[in-house]
Image (cartoon, grey):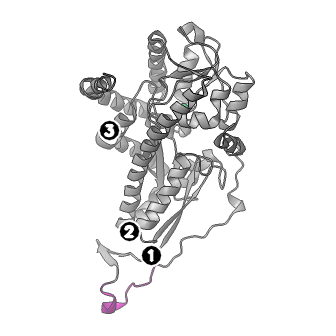
Amino acid sequence: MSFFCEKMHKNRTYWHNYTFMKSRRKFLTSTALGGIGIGLGSACSDEVIRKEGNSRIDYSKKYSWKMFTTWPPNFPILGEGCVLFSQWVEEMSGGRMKIRVFGGGEIVPALETFEAVKEGIAEMGNAAAYYWAGKIPSSQLFASVPFGLNAQQMNTWLLAYGGEQLWREIYEPFNLIPFTTGNTGVQMGGWFNQKIDSIEDISGLKMRIPGLGGKVWAKAGGTTVLVSGGEIYTNLERGVIDATEWIGPYHDYLMGFHQVAKYYYYPGWHEPGTAFESFVNREKYLELPPDLREIITSALYRLNLWLISQFEMKNAEHLELIKKTGKVQILAFPDSVLKELKRYKGEVIDELIASDPASKKVFDSISSFKELMGPWTRISEKEFYKTQDL
Ligand code: CA
């Protein structure tokens, strides 16, 4: 078992320890240095105080924020990225803004992050939007849709086509402003101990596959099993589950799945580009001077790019490491299987949008975006990829 694999197993409590711990720790509130430099007359005319409308803005005030994340502390790429984000904000703001990052379970359970930021217990959160599907069914469409958008298309839909605007409307009643902050890129289809040659082979197969992908799997005759991150390895090893998906070669390698499964299937039809989110408590965000708001926004954009680049780099490197173990066959799902799964995906989405008007609105936006992109993508990205193998 690799070092990181061991580390992840040790961190397993973060995945299912949902005991509310907020009362156990106390935190410094903002340092409340506001007031320094305000109203000191002409001697301070060069003070970093400017007017916005009729209100005076104190550019010397210091802020101390908390970011709750749904990841174990320092979780590879995802947790690390949040720590970097806080460093960028501190440096860009000349130390006026500090954001302390907490892993899931350190103060509140991972899945309480949304509620904690909504209530202002923390000012910011970092997660994947599908965690909130029970509360806001449409939220999962801002993370990933089976056979949906890849990372580049997801960013384009969100940042240039109006997807982010829709997302903000949906989070507004919850007092949160969401930002897209990274993407896994195309995930892998998962680890199996038997071959998938036809859709019939899925029948009765117990797989750990969450979210909309899991619903598609169930429609195809498979059994969807809920397993916390820290227990997947053992369950796969002992045959409690027949298969699992996780993320991509990097995180999968760290989990050690190559030691307990024979086949590694691609592509990750169920998560072609899962986007991550950061959200900010709306009131806390609007209290900030405009420059700090822009610093946070810019650092979140940087996090988006940093994360995508890290996933691409590390996945490519670790795919080679997985190959080098010589223990795993890396196989493509047959087209016939993907075609059937895609058909079932249509049924899953139809059921979702029939039961939730917001999901319909979001999915209609994704669909019209895909229709617009299709002709362009077919003669740009798709054709260019072919040339890389010439
Ligand atoms: Ca996954």
In the image, which residues are magenta?
34-46
Q: Which residue is mark 1?
A: 61
Q: Which residue is mark 3?
A: 156
Taking the image as drawn, is residue 135 in sight?
no
Query: Quarter of the image containing the N terminus?
Result: top right
Please provide percent x and percent y for residue 348.
Answer: 49, 21
Question: Residue 53: which disc?
Answer: none
For mark 3, give the secondary structure: helix
Query: Mark 3 near ligand 1 (CB under 8 Å)?
Result: no
Q: Amino acid at mark 2?
A: Pro
Q: Amino acid at mark 1?
A: Lys
Residue at coordinates 36% horizontally, 61% vertically from top-left? 294
Distance between the Cα atoms at labels 2 and 1?
9 Å
Q: Earlier in the sequence, mark 3 or mark 1?
A: 1
For mark 2, give the secondary structure: loop
Residue at coordinates 53% horizontally, 46% vertically from top-left? 78
